Amino acid sequence: MKIAIGADPNAEDFKKQLIPYMKELGHDVLDYGSADPIYANVAFSVAADVVAGKADRGVLICGTGIGMSIAANKVEGAYAALVADVYQAQRAQLSNNANIMAMGSQVTGIELAKCLVKEYLANTYERNSRSASKVDRITEYEKKGG
């Protein structure tokens, strides 16, 4: 899979530790940087390119992951899930078809982050799952503009 990753300046070292790990898992990684102090700009770029198909999924990191997830979700077609445990990382895909995961470098240890990334990328949304009608309702609402 092709993964777009971006971070804020506070999470640069964290991102730099995740990139080689994702490559070890067999993924191509597109680094969107971490220099912009306005982290929303990175989130918008990653989200837009995931939606456009330039990357299969995205990973965003800031101090808590909250700001990145809020910003990414402003891009139509981007569905960013803030994950903090393995079950959430799995369900982000399995139940919610999230095309982006966000996490916090100041609240998540790097070894847990590796587990979260691995689980998120290992799972795929099942179109015929019991969650399909819920996901469909979200995308329907978005397309109608509310």
Image: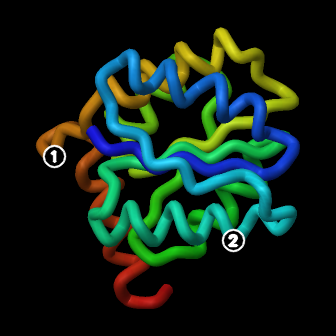
Residue under pointer 2: 41
Select label 1 or label 2 by which is in front: 2
Residue 98's place in the image compared with 139, above or below, is: above
Answer yes or no: is residue 83 visible.
yes
- Residue 63's label in the rendered image is none
Across and down, in percent, residue 78 comes to: 45, 64
How many residues crowd around disc 2 within 10 Å: few (fewer than 14), some, or many (20 or more)? Answer: some
Q: Is residue 81 visible?
A: no
**Rendered residue at 33%/31% (across/down):** 27
Quick check: 10 above or below 48? above
Please identify the residue farthest to the left as the structure is shown: 128
**In the displayed structure, does residue 42 sit left or right of residue 38?**
left
Mark 1, residues whose alpha carbon is within 10 Å: few (<14), some, or many (≥20)?
some
Identity of the residue drawn at 53% across and 14% down? 115
Q: Residue at x 51, y 23 (%)?
A: 20
Mark 1 and mark 2 residues within 8 Å of each other at the beta carbon = no
Callout 1: helix, strand or loop? loop
Where does the image place residue 133, in percent across and percent down from the top left? 26, 55
Q: Secondary structure at mark 2?
A: helix
Whole-number angstrom distance, CA of label 1 to CA of label 2:
31 Å
Three-letter amino acid code at the position of disc 2: Asn
| 107 vs 9: above or below | above
Quadrant holding the N terminus? top left
Residue toward you, 14 or 133 = 14
**Is 27 on the left-hand or right-hand side of 89?**
left
Of the pair 34 and 41, the residue shown nearer to us: 34
Q: Earlier in the sequence, mark 1 or mark 2?
A: 2
The residue under label 1 is: 127
Three-letter amino acid code of the residue under disc 1: Arg
Name the image colouring: rainbow
* Apparent side of residue 95 relative to residue 9 in the rendered image (left or right): left
